[in-house]
Image (cartoon, rainbow, N blue to C red):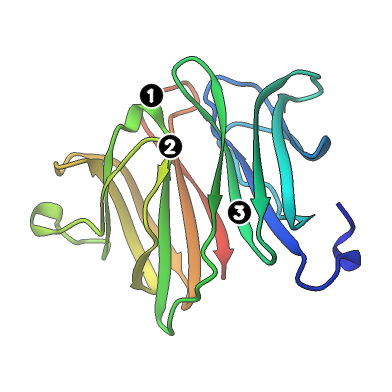
């Protein structure tokens, strides 16, 4: 890909990467054979945004410094598109998932939140975004039964301090409690849900700032 200042206007896309395959050592994230995120550790943070040419791109993940692809996928990137790429863990293999980020902007005093369920131990989850002291007993989830390896919809919520709780789908049993997340007006966040570093519970989260 060209440098960010060399792309023709309107013919670029941005990607960010997260290592979410529990049990794997650090990962090199590659686009079209070039390393774009070196030595990414499990569950620590999303990579910096990488600017690529729009169009057909191939993504791979390797152990840091290695020569063998653990997972590969291809995607045609839209002009001005933005994407969240996650290395996740299936029962017997690794997989690269590509989630298209929203191009919409929340209204004043609102924010968008999306959950990316990439924790095998989580199962299907319901998503609650509430005030810090809200009781879930009578609450209705903003997103229901988010499956493993799937994203929730973008949930519109009030900006400011919000508490995000995930429960086992159809129950009030909390499997992850993010208390609290500050959401500026008109901001967008994608929150990846991962297993603990040693696997299983307690679940953890890594937040991507799509728009601030």
Rendering coords of residue 65 (x, y %): 81, 23
Q: From the viewer's perspective, is residue 9 above or below residue 125?
A: below
**Would you call the spot at circle 3 few (<14 residues within 10 Å), some (14-19), or many (20 or more)?**
many
Q: Earlier in the sequence, mark 1 or mark 3?
A: 3
Marking on residue 83: 3
* Foreground tag (1 vs 3): 3
Give the residue displayed 44% in from the left and 29% down from the top: 196
Q: Earlier in the sequence, mark 3 or mark 2?
A: 3
Question: Which residue position holds label 1?
Answer: 200
Rendering coords of residue 211 (x, y %): 57, 68
**Would you call the spot at circle 2 few (<14 residues within 10 Å), some (14-19), or many (20 or more)?**
many
Q: CA distance from mark 3 to mark 2?
A: 15 Å
Q: Secondary structure at mark 1?
A: loop
Q: Secondary structure at mark 3?
A: strand
Question: Which residue position holds label 2?
Answer: 149
Rendering coords of residue 207 (x, y %): 51, 52
Q: Pointers 1 and 3 in contact (CB under 8 A)? A: no
In-image side of 121 versus 91 (left or right): left
Rendering coords of residue 80 (x, y %): 68, 67
Q: CA distance from mark 1 to mark 3?
A: 27 Å
In-image side of 199 versus 97 (left or right): left
Q: CA distance from mark 1 to mark 2?
A: 16 Å
């Amino acid at each position: 890909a060209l440098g960010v200042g060399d792309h023709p206007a309107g013919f670029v896309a941005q990607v960010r990467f997260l290592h979410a395959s529990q049990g794997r050592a650090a990962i090199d994230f590659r686009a079209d054979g070039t390393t774009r995120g070196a030595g990414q550790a499990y569950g620590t943070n999303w990579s910096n945004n990488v600017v690529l040419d729009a169009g057909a791109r191939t993504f791979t993940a390797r152990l840091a410094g290695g020569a063998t692809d653990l997972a590969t996928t291809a995607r045609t990137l839209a002009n001005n598109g933005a994407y969240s790429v996650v290395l996740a863990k299936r029962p017997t293999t690794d997989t690269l998932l590509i989630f298209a980020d929203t191009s919409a902007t929340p209204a004043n005093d609102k924010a968008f939140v999306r959950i990316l369920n990439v924790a095998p131990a989580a199962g299907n989850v319901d998503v609650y975004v509430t005030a810090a002291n809200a009781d879930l007993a009578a609450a209705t989830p903003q997103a229901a039964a988010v499956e493993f390896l799937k994203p929730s919809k973008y949930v519109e919520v009030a900006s400011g301090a919000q508490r995000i709780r995930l429960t086992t789908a159809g129950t009030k049993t909390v499997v992850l409690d993010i208390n609290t997340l500050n959401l500026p007006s008109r901001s967008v966040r994608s929150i990846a849900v991962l297993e603990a570093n040693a696997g299983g519970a307690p679940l953890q989260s890594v937040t991507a700032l799509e728009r601030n």
